[in-house]
Image: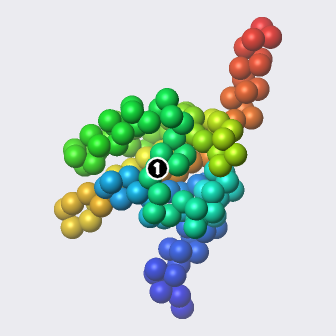
Amino acid sequence: MEDQSQLAERIMDQVADAIIYADRMGVIIRWNRASTALFGFSAEDALGQSLDLIIPEHLRAPHWLGFEAAIAKATMKLQGRPTLTRALHKSGRKLYVEMTFAIVKGEGEVLGSVAMARDVTDRVERERAATRAA
């Protein structure tokens, strides 16, 4: 029987959604295969980098305000609720992603945050095209 950490690794690598864990400073510590597929950066490219890697320039200031507040308060407004936002692909292309966020706590302290993301670019572009056509 596999131990729990090996099982957790298998789950992380095999889920369809991108899972990104960042420490309290916003440094990427975990990056699963789906993150590579979505954002184009390998784990080697992403690990140890700032979350700015996937955040479009115009969204960085509001992102960091929210991130720092969430870390300080150990809670976030969007906790568990999907939100539509923009993200950057390695190619420079902007994506529409639906993300959910959570604060990760251990022994009474905030360790970091986790985000789960999926690409919804095609859906958003179809909806916008239908709205323009109407």
- In the rendered image, residue 34, in percent from the top left (x then y), is placed at 64, 59
Name which residue lies at 27% across and 48% down.
Answer: 71
Name of the residue lying farthest toward the top: 134
Disc 1 designates what residue? Answer: 51
Name of the residue lying farthest toward the right: 133
Name which residue lies at 75% across and 11% down.
Answer: 132
Q: Quadrant of the N terminus?
A: bottom right
Classify residue 79 by image quadrant. top left
Please say whether residue 6 is visible from this viewpoint: yes
Name which residue lies at 26% across and 65% down.
Answer: 106
Vertical position of residue 129 compared to residue 38: above or below: above
Please say whether residue 32 is visible from this viewpoint: no
Q: Is residue 66 left or right of residue 85?
A: left
Q: Is residue 127 left or right of residue 109?
A: right
Amino acid type for the residue under numbered disc 1: Leu
Classify residue 131 by image quadrant. top right
- In the rendered image, residue 15, in percent from the top left (x then y), is placed at 62, 62
Vertical position of residue 85 compared to residue 111: above or below: above
Name which residue lies at 65% across and 45% down.
Answer: 89
Name of the residue lying farthest toward the left: 108
Q: Is residue 12 left or right of residue 110?
A: right
Q: Secondary structure at mark 1?
A: helix
- In the rendered image, residue 91, in percent from the top left (x then y), is placed at 70, 46
Q: Nearer the viewer, residue 123 or 64?
A: 64
Q: How busy is the neighbourhood of tag 1: few (under 14 within 10 Å), some, or many (20 plus)?
A: many
Q: Quadrant of the C terminus?
A: top right
Classify residue 122 by image quadrant. top right
